[in-house]
Amino acid sequence: SAVGVAWSTAHALLAASAGATPRARAPALHPRVVSRRGPTHLASVEPAASLVGGGTGGLGHRHRQSGSSPFASSRDMGKKARRRCASCGVEYKQRTDKSRFCSVRCAAVTGPSTGVGVAKPFKDMVPGAAGGESKYGDVPPAFAGASVVAAASGYAGSGYGSDASASSSSDFQWDGFGTGKGSKGGKGNRKRKKRAKKGARGESLRPVEEDPGCVAVLQLLDRRCVVISGPGPAMDEAVARIQACDVVAVDCEGVNMSRVGAVTLLQVAAGDRAYLFDVQAMGRACFEMVSDASVTNGRNLKSVLEDPRVLKLMFDCRVDSDALFHQHGVSLTNVFDVQLADVAARRRNHHAVSLLSGMPKCAGRWLPKGPNQAEAALAAQDNSSLSRDSSDPNAPPDAASVARVTEHLKRKVKEQYASNLGGDGELWAKRPLAEDVRRYAALDAWLLKEIYSAMEHANVLDEDWRARVVKESERRVGEYRDLEEPIMQFRCQERAQAPDL
């Protein structure tokens, strides 16, 4: 055809410009050109390859050596050469790890000389494989060892080594997928390094009861905690201090916390005090009674919690609001959920936040960072100025110490009341409160104020984001309270999702 003649002429001109003489018989067409006899196969194009160049360094000579046409070998002209799998024979692009297998499955297929059976789907791939099935069923073994792979692939004398190298599993590489011990920068290596680093950091820390920074936090909680078990002057003074503050922190504890689970303790942090009101001992009188109305200006605890002029800081207020309303008739107003503020502050910094954070993480994220704990421990031994600063009762606790104490107390108290850990579900109904339980309760309220103060000082929320937090906090106050069925306090994946603000 005319197109074929034109194509042959073009090849002749190209060869003439390169100084080579075209062959006489070169009427082959481009594979995409269809002649009258039908489509031309790649094999019929082979003579045309010689027109591209006849020299030893020419392109045509290279393709004649490989026994294929330039069009058929165009896939070899990419960035990486193609290799043939030593197990299944499939061609694949060469990777940086110089593996001889196209996939993890091919690398895991065992050979006949190992005594380990080959999984069903791979019997046909390995010549002379044993008839027995692998104990893994249809899934190849997760790690077969270097000698196994060498025997399966026929490269016993190649880079994978012989049986001598099989004893060292660190010499084996999982085909560049980053899961083997020997793969550089693989997930296995990264996880081990992370665990080793975490372990080294943990070894350098003293126990919480011996670390100077953590002991300072525990002593601070003991000084600021006030337990109120009945009406009287202590109760009147606490209500007067709370109603005089613009910002207070509120939290509740109880047995099976919900509208049907008893609220046994109410924590309110106001000023430099953390008040623990024994709701189990006082009942509804805790919220409605005062001994001397002149001290409290005629107000009680319920009126303060419902006062829209007092900002109430809470951490996931849904269950607490539900329980206070249905058991004691308290309707919380002007609530600022610190957990939502943490989400808003991070999203304002263009972070993708999909899950809510707990109190320890929020404390470590927003509280002012103090000295490194290992350095503080060494300084305490050397009686340096750093240890004197950390033992100063007026010095604010650093984030690392607060986070450690929070995790420590939460773990210890959870072990005491979690039924799945062998604890007593009635822990919050026992009196008197144990030392760790009392510190845990005071910490929840005190820490809310500290986190909020740190966020306000750093100005992490502008007016727009703050308005979003206030709006979502108001919705949270009535989310469980307005339902007909009670919602129990438990953790699940759905509740851990961060809401859209």
Image (tube, grey):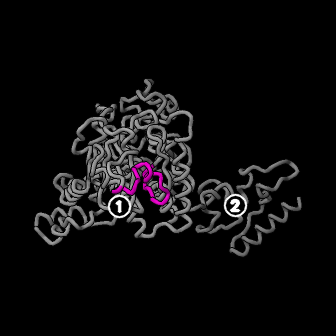
Residue 190 pos. (x, y %)? 37, 54
Q: Which residues are magenta?
A: 294-316
The residue at 54%/52% (across/down) is: 474
Q: Quadrant of residue 30?
A: bottom right
Label 2: element kind: helix
Label 1 vs 2, first from the N-terminus: 2
- Mark 1 nearby-residue class (10 Å; few <14, some 14–19, many ≥20): some
Q: Write down the residue under mark 1.
A: 450
Provide the residue designation for mark 2.
49
Q: Position of residue 46 (x, y in %)?
A: 70, 55
Q: Is residue 501 above or below residue 418?
A: below
Q: The C terminus is located in which quarter?
A: bottom right
Q: Residue at x 19, y 67 (%)?
A: 392
Residue 341 magenta-drawn? no
Q: Determine the secondary structure under disc 1.
A: helix
Residue 480 in the image, given as x and y percentages of width and height: 52, 41
Bin the neighbour count of mark 2 within 10 Å (Cα to Cα): few under 14, some 14-19, many 20 and up: many
Where's residue 377, x and y in %? 17, 62
Q: Which mark is residue 52?
A: none
**Mark-to-mark CA distance, 1 and 2:** 78 Å
Camera sees residue 184: no
Of 143 and 256, the residue lying toward us: 256
Q: Quadrant of the N terminus?
A: bottom right
Q: Is residue 300 magenta?
A: yes
**Image-based side of 447 in relation to 89, left or right:** left
Would residue 226 be found to the left or right of residue 186 on screen? left
- Which of the two residues, 356 or 486, is positioned nearer the viewer here? 486
Identified by mark 1, the residue type is Glu
The residue at the point 48 percent across, 49 percent down is 332
Q: What amino acid does circle 2 point to?
A: Ala
